[in-house]
Image (spheres, grey):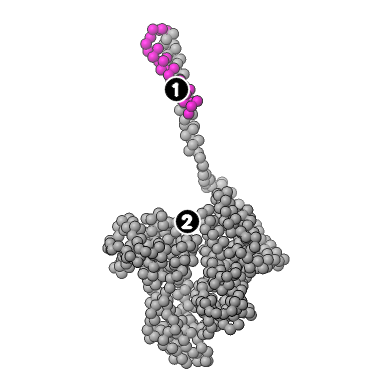
Amino acid sequence: MVKLRSFSLTQNKKDLERVGQILNILVQFQIGGYVEKLIQAENLHIHISRRSASAEIKRMTQPERFARMFEELGTSFVKFGQILATREDIIGPDYAIELAKLHDDMKPFPTADARRIIKDELGKSVEQIFSKFEDKPMASASIAQVHRARLKNGKEVVVKIQRPGIEDTIKEDIRIMHYLAYLADKNIPELRPYSPQYLVDEFERSILKELDFSREAKNSARMKENFKGVKGIYIPIVYQEFSAKRVLTMEEIKGVKLTAFINSKANKEDKDIVARRLLRAYMQMILVDGFYHSDPHPGNIMILRGSTLCFLDFGRCASVDRELAANIFRLILFAVDNDVNGLIAHLLRTNLVEDNSDVKELKADLTDLLDADYDPDVKNIKIGEMLADMISIISKHDFNRPRALAELTRTLLILEGVGMQLDSKFNVSEEFGPYSQKYVAESLDPEKMTDLIKDGLLDFQYLARELPSTFRRLMKKISQGRITLQLEHKNLDTLTADMKDMTDRMSISMILAALIVGSSIIVHAMPSSVIGLALFAASAAIGVWLVLKTLVF
């Protein structure tokens, strides 16, 4: 669970107006109940419209309303919605599907602004860099627009230029998102399972990377190096000397968008080749390079001559730690083999699931899942779908969810979806088998084992060097009486109550014995004494009550 962090918002007029605008749009899309809770809990002085939702909005499903609401909220929230679409493990599949449909096309900004940004970023005018520059953009989106141009050396290029002021706009909206997420976490318990603050943190990390085109240029160069010499895969050239934080210059690619290729009359053989190359490219990215294009939708891939795949837009790339990739890889292997015991042991061994989890309950849930998904023919198993279902189940059992796992799962789901459009028999498992054998063979390679032993010896060397001083510090604290033991008791409340009840009964028994002895002496001395007889009768009654209480209760 994400720890609740306090967050305040500067109460200036502009901030309050934007918060009011956002809250009114939430009401417009029938999320007014949450808005009322926030306003009452925080005593916000914001006017909320009481207009009822339109007939069109009322006809929408809740996920459809949710996606439409993000469009209405503006650019930052559209981008936020696109990031949320990658977190099916948190928001659920229905919402993820609708949010994935969000588009961020916008009207072009003035060419004069584009030229000014180029000069500000590159230190030279458009005329000094390009022999030709088309003022009319070929595409325009929320973050940037793209112009065709030609370098002085005759190379045809496209120039991606960031929309003026978009970074400041997004940062302002992120501040407000942080504020609203904090209020939601604080005041709306039913939203806490969705981790509002965590989701805003993740969006901030992602969008700030996307706004830095110099990072995209580096991602592209790294990917080009990884696929150097690989047949059927092409990565465009990015001209680093003509790229900066807000400008990206790359070679113009002339081919067919994968979207159009899927819907074209291309023969089945060509589509099969493209599907296989796409899958093998991702197997290499994820399992070999540990660095992959995390947004493989058809709009980001072009088909060149000879069924060659060309990847575009490297603003969203992700790295997978070698150890994490290996752990995810083994999870999939156990699941494909329907080995639930191996799967659970691996989850515990890698600390993906806490030791104090209910293992029996987890095993029952995973057994149900694997039984439903299992197929003796591995080609029929949908890896992305199975991994997503597995994460959904494990998330209910103290799952330490790595951020990279959700991104990877989403990428596999998109990959399988695109592959199925190319080839109805497309399946990740078909290529997964050979890669799994290769992975196992490489993990047992003597050189890899030697590296592993070296790492272990280095750890042992560090431990041997630090152990004496650590032990000395420990003994010093013990001798000074500075060691504090923290004990955690479990079920002692019941034991304490039982001991108290037993002590009470012993006390009553002693008092009862004294009364019996005292009354007996009085009756023996004065047979007709009313006090003695009354005490004796009372003692008898108390005795009977004590016996019944002990036997019955």
Q: Position of residue 502 (x, y in %)?
A: 49, 29
Instruction: Give the crowd class for mark 2: few <14, some 14-19, many >=20 residues within 10 Å.
Output: few
| Residues shaded magenta | 525-553
Viewed as shown, does residue 31 lie left or right of 85? left
Nearer the observer, 221 or 54: 54
The quarter of the picture where residue 282 lies is bottom right
Identify the residue under disc 2: 1
Q: Are marks 1 and 2 in contact (CB under 8 Å)?
A: no
Residue at 43% from the left image edge and 68% from the top image edge: 80
Q: On screen, 480 above or below 375?
A: above
Residue at 51% from the left image edge and 85% from the top image edge: 252
Is residue 286 magenta-colored?
A: no
Q: Position of residue 229 (x, y in %)?
A: 64, 80
Q: What kind of secondary structure does the magenta stretch mostly adopt?
A: helix
Which residue of the protein is positioned furthest toward the right in this rendering? 446
Q: On screen, 306 above or below 389?
A: below
Viewed as shown, does residue 392 lie left or right of 29? right
Disc 1 marks which amino acid? Trp
Residue at 60% from the left image edge and 63% from the top image edge: 381
Does the rendering let one see residue 448? no
Is residue 540 magenta-colored?
A: yes
Which of pointers 1 and 2 lies earlier in the amino acid sequence?
2
Q: On screen, 152 above or below 360?
A: below
Q: Position of residue 64 (x, y in %)?
A: 41, 65
Does the rendering let one see residue 339? yes
Viewed as shown, does residue 458 lie left or right of 180? right
Residue at 58% from the left image edge and 66% from the top image edge: 321
Q: On screen, 485 above or below 60?
A: above
Disc 2 marks which amino acid? Met
Q: Position of residue 299 (x, y in %)?
A: 50, 76
Tag of residue 126: none
Identify the residue under disc 1: 545
